[in-house]
Image: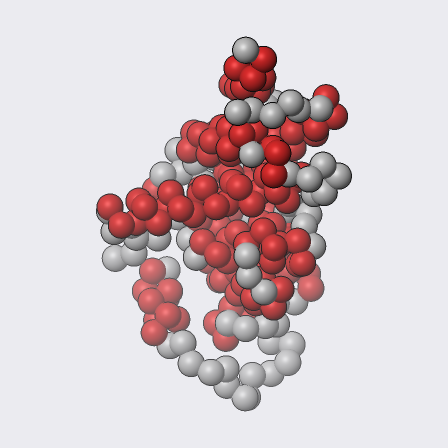
Amino acid sequence: MPPKVSASLRASLIQEMASLRAFAVSLCGDKERADDLVQETLFKAWNHLDSFREGTNLKAWLFTILRNTYFSERRKRKREVEDADGSYAANLATPPEQPGHMDMQDFLGALSRLPDDQREALVLIGAAGFSYEEAAEISNCAVGTIKSRVNRARNRLAELLHFDEDRLESSGNTEIVTGRSSKRA
Amino acid sequence: MSNLNDAKRRGKKPRAKTQKIGEYGDAGKSGKQGLSPSLQSHIGRQLRAMFDGVAHEPVPDRFLQLLKDLEQSGDK
């Protein structure tokens, strides 16, 4: 039974949709899937709004629902088809439009090749603006675990994107990992 | 590229003690720590650009429609 939702809570819910969607795209790398994920999250959130304490962190609550939905779906899928980590990159049909940022797609491709937990941690901390403590709560793990995941994620990204100091100095157009061509041989 | 990755994966061993501090180019290989601040912030900028790029797109109508539908079903 859907609860009676206050106008302010409804407004906050709408306000968080955009970043929730960005989180979904970052996690699954595919806008269509991301939108389905957000839709499912909103549906679940609405039906469990009575368990949300108004005044607490709505954004973190929504992100938690979304990542739990994503990971349980992913586990299910993994059982069905043994899903190599390259499949995510191959599914990158609709990367975010970023005029002037030709390497954005490559960045998303590289992000997609990180282990799920590392990608999640990096996005929560580095883009979504959560604290380590909040991220730990969202991911249901220790703060130290989030920290080490973020570190490993950064190192791995630098590796995948062939970032190094020299190239960084010389141009913004770093050598690119094409992501899609290289399903691991 | 893929060979490189596999090699790294296999070569996962404790970081050599001889790693020089400041040799940031090797940070990825040794795994644990040591990306330079400028490299970290470069990755950070790209990450945020990607994230914000999506976050600044208009919210799909279907989400707002969903809320309306849910609300209406609650009223009945």
* Residue farthest along the bottom direction in this orientation: B17
Taking depth in this image into account, of A141 and B14 the one nearest to the observer is A141
Point 37% across, 77% down: residue? B11
Residue A11 in view: no
> Relative to A88, is B16 above or below?
below
Q: Quadrant of the N terminus of chain B?
A: bottom left
Q: Position of residue A94 (x, y in %)?
A: 44, 31
> Relative to B51, is A176 above or below?
below
Residue B32 in view: yes
Q: How is the image coloured?
A: secondary structure
Point 34% across, 60% down: residue? B2
Q: Position of residue A162 (x, y in %)?
A: 49, 59
Taking depth in this image into account, of A162 and B71 the one nearest to the observer is B71
Q: Quadrant of the C terminus of chain B?
A: top right
Point 71% across, 24% down: residue? A6
Which quadrant would residue A145 be assigned to in this image? bottom right
Q: Position of residue A24 (x, y in %)?
A: 51, 39
Mark count: 0
Q: Position of residue A80 (x, y in %)?
A: 24, 46
Taking depth in this image into account, of A99 and A4 the one nearest to the observer is A4
Taking depth in this image into account, of A32 and B31 the one nearest to the observer is A32
Point 51% across, 28% down: residue? A43
